[in-house]
Image (spheres, rainbow, N blue to C red):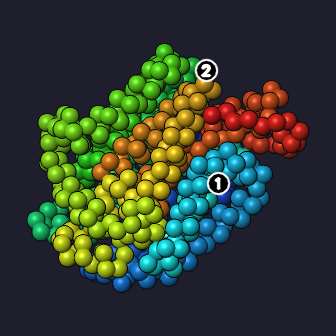
Amino acid sequence: MTPGIATFFFAVGILALFALDRDKNARTSKALWIPVVWMLLAGSRMVSQWLEAGSVATVSPEQLLDGSPLDRNILAGLIAAGVTVLFGRRREVGTLLRANWSILVFFVYCGYSVLWSDYPDVAFKRWMKAVGDLVMILIVLTDPDRPAALKRFLARIGFLLVPTSILLIKYYPHLGQGWTGVEGKVFFNGVALNKNLLGVICLVSGLGCVWRLIEALRDREGTRKAGPLIAQGTVLAMVLVLLWRANSLTSLGCFMLAAGLMAAMILPALARKRGVLHLLVVSVLFFAFGAMFLNVGSDLVETMGRDSTLTGRTGLWQTLLNMNQYPLLGTGFESFWLGKRLEDLWGIYWWRPNEAHNGYLEVFLNLGWTGVTLLALVIATGYRNIVSAFRRDPHTGGLRLAYFVAGTAYGFTEAAFRMMSPVWIVFVLAIIAVPELGSVPSVRRATSSPFCHEPWDRTAILLSRKLPTRRIF
């Protein structure tokens, strides 16, 4: 089959996935496409990189400082469009922000750290992208039909990125495949720039598919539809193939742990007992941490292709710690991998690292112990929000818990908590507390869970002005 014919059939297949998964009763805002486009760029390549795809180009430290004006303008346009949408939903946005003070404090500190960066202009631009992540999350959470918005947000990402990755790998190898610098070994990257980002796409989309399938299997009202089952099952099968072929072991391991935990939450006895839930989460995270750093299950790790140095990561970590001169405040937001430090590291390592391959170390290098402490506060309050959500909606709580565990574990060997990282975006989406509008029964029914809400109507808003609000997480 020629690439042109294959492209036609894949395009028809993607349209078929959208048609099969369509819910005629859902009424989501057209603005939902703004965070979808943002996530598509975050999970694949910037527009300038697509335009240069297939050409042989070496990125220099100077180019990383300058960036691309085209990409900057596109992202600024998306942020501006998102802010415009949120201004029309400012009452709901204000309520959400007040309920999530720890996340706000973390983002404010990130912005404040721009002041002591060696490259404040670059740091400020990157901080604006981080704010863009929050803007996109708020668009999803303030959609008039939250359950449908969450489903469509995740489905659109998976339907567009996952099949397209298979198309590029098989029929456009100059775009979908790459080669390692020394060994010349072929790796699969699909729509992404590297296999790790392809693994992230599969991790985020795959957990969304598992959630939808579990939701359909748990349907006790006899409303189960074959279309969504076929669409989600097809994408999940593609995700599993890509995870295996891409050899992105961190994403594969996180997917297995998070999906298994989400499946375990089907049992009501587990979902309702907080002690059991805490034990499961701690056990899963300890297993992931122990396998990587404490030689717990080392045979399994080696079977998956990791050696005792985690593919050279431990040596890199030691080098980075020796280079860190500002342990309290860090070098400034997203500023460590710039200038002279980057040149020195690229001179040491042939694979030219641009991240610490550990999310917590990455935060330490850029934001110091202060940033690590604030991140720990975000994680702790986010976990509390998720656990509390099980009282009202155990099923949606399972998805949130899966993204929480996946993001936390992914940070052990990859930079999970970075701007425009799909893992970071869904992690924040999962941990955000959504406040209840009021205590009148009609309003309570419309706000019964963090994602499963009926549309905010004028009556609910008017009632919420007169009644005290309280957090449901």
Q: In this image, 80 relative to 117: left or right?
A: right
Mark 2 falls on what kind of element? Answer: loop
What amino acid does circle 2 point to?
Glu
Is 249 located above or below residue 395 in the figure?
below
Q: How far apart are marks 2 and 1 (CA)?
A: 30 Å
Label 1, residues with CA under 10 Å away: few <14, some 14-19, many ≥20: many
Q: Which residue is drawn at 38% across and 62% down?
A: 327
State which quarter of the image contains the N terminus: bottom left
Is 326 located above or below residue 163 in the figure?
below
Label 2, residues with CA under 10 Å away: few <14, some 14-19, many ≥20: few
Q: Mark 2 touching mark 1, by CB under 8 A?
A: no
Whether residue 28 is visible, yes or no, is no
Between residues 3 and 447, which one lies in front from this camera angle?
447
Q: Where is residue 321 in the image (x, y as percent from the top left)?
A: 28, 61
Report which residue position mark 1 lands on: 139
Query: Which of the numbered marks, if any, corresponds to residue 221?
Result: 2
State which quarter of the image contains the C terminus: top right
